[in-house]
Image: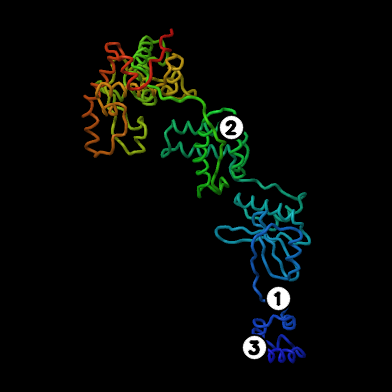
Amino acid sequence: MYHSILNKSDQILNHNPLEGLEKQGLWADIHSRCLSCRVRRLLPPRCPRPRITLLPEKLTVSSIEKHARSGRRAEIADTSAPGLVLRSNVSSSTFVFRWTDQREKRRLVLGTVDGLPLADARAIAHKAADLVRQGFDPDDEWLRQTRTPQAVAPVKRVTWTWTEAREAYLLEIGGPNGLKAATVDDYRKALYHRAFKRFERRFVCDLTDEDLSEALAGYQREQKGKAAEGLRRRVRPFWTYLQRMDIRRKSGVTRRLQIDLPAHRSTAKTNVRWPHPADVAALFAKAIEGELGYASRAVVLLCLTAQRRATVVSASPTDVRDGVWHIPPVHRKTAEKRGDTRIHALPWPPEVAVGNHDSFVFPADRPRKAGDPLPHMAASTLTHALRDAGVGFSPHDIRRSFTTTMRILGFAADPALVLDHNEGPRSTMDAHYDSYRDLPRKREMLDVWREYLTGSKAMSDEVWYEHTGQKRIKKTTKA
């Protein structure tokens, strides 16, 4: 059969080979079954053979020449430039840039191998990939201007710089459904940090993992603490926002972020402190006498109730009714996130005057901006007041001292009622009545705690050391 086909093809060649083969139905048979040079000469100028895709490789001048001489219809992706592909043909080979737009595959012919050097093809491919990340599609006009730099018209980038992305993110998390004001302020301080100053004018889509890792690693070596780790924790949600699908066209960020920091071993001791009740009493006496200045009244409430800093400074006169402090969920840690709508009721200490201020019991000394309403005192004011007083412990340590004292006296798990710890989910009816049901127990514990602060009762150093392993802080004896 094979030889009969060749004999017939020789007869047809003497007349009109292609037309004769098509008429006799022998063309497909010869093309599929015969690979000899004799039959290959019968193929038409445009061979119907499909183009094959070879494995990606790093193209070189010699490998390009090898593929061009092979005569194969093939595509070879270059591993050194994103989207750059060599398309080899029987007659000539070309460089092509490929990309995907809305799940549609697109391509742009950059030029022939003879007319476009490999280095220039890679440079054009890098520019085209950058253009695609910005939301543009490279076309023939862009290619012409890119290959002739003297005629290039600058392309205005529409993606965000670090400054623009930062403002958009802070606006997003500071909205009505965003985070608390204190949390937003914490993120603002982190993103405005001097470690990121070098990125102010850079486009966020151009920033690499190496850029951010070097910036934070340099700050860690300079600061020698855990502050760099804190910045990394705050940059991660910022980057997650930038790569969100509805934000990508504005930010140009399409990849996840990986920030590596060098291993850090802190030599500083971070022992948890349990201030002796007598040490807290010494601080309370200073606050009662007004020795802590502007923060004295707030420190008195802090010592008597053992509440968190933010809860103390945000106290409002409208929250104090009939001698009971009704702390709303918005001023309680994680209450809104947990869906806890209960108020936290505590007896209001008579030592602290509520005052006549319209908004807060402890107003700030000045507004943030001229014409703005007066906010409440900053929570950090309490920390600074205790540090300046030289007591040797922080506002949060007072909560540990209260808890330990109550447990030594036999109140067991009841201190959690005063400290507003998460006590588990309850029904709506229970949530309403439990706010006041535990009030007598809370009052009993706070009255006992007041006796230790005023000196009516005293805790022996031996008993305190037995339960905490810590001795009294001697700094409180200083004037």
| Left or right of 159, for residue 340 | left
| Left or right of 462, for residue 427 | left
| Rendered location of residue 237, percent (x, y) | 49, 41
| Rendered location of residue 291, percent (x, y) | 41, 10
> Which element type, helix, strand or loop, lies under badge 3?
loop
Of the numbered discs 1 and 2, the one sitting upstream in the chain is 1
The amino acid beneath tag 3 is: Gly
Tell me how far mark 1 sits from mark 3, CA to CA: 19 Å
Q: Quadrant of the C terminus?
A: top left
* Residue at the spot of label 2: 195
Return the residue found at the far top: 479
Of the numbered discs 1 and 3, the one sitting upstream in the chain is 3
* Residue at the spot of label 3: 25
The amino acid beneath tag 2 is: Ala
Specify the quadrant of the image occupied by residue 389: top left
Relative to 291, say whether 383 is above or below.
Answer: below
Tell me how far mark 1 sits from mark 2, CA to CA: 61 Å
Badge 1: residue crowd in 10 Å (few <14, some 14–19, many ≥20)? few
Specify the quadrant of the image occupied by residue 50: bottom right
- Residues marked 1 and 2 touching at CB (< 8 Å): no
Of the numbered discs 3 and 2, the one sitting upstream in the chain is 3
| Rendered location of residue 323, percent (x, y) | 25, 20
* Residue at the spot of label 1: 46
| Rendered location of residue 446, percent (x, y) | 27, 20
- In front: 325, or 420? 420
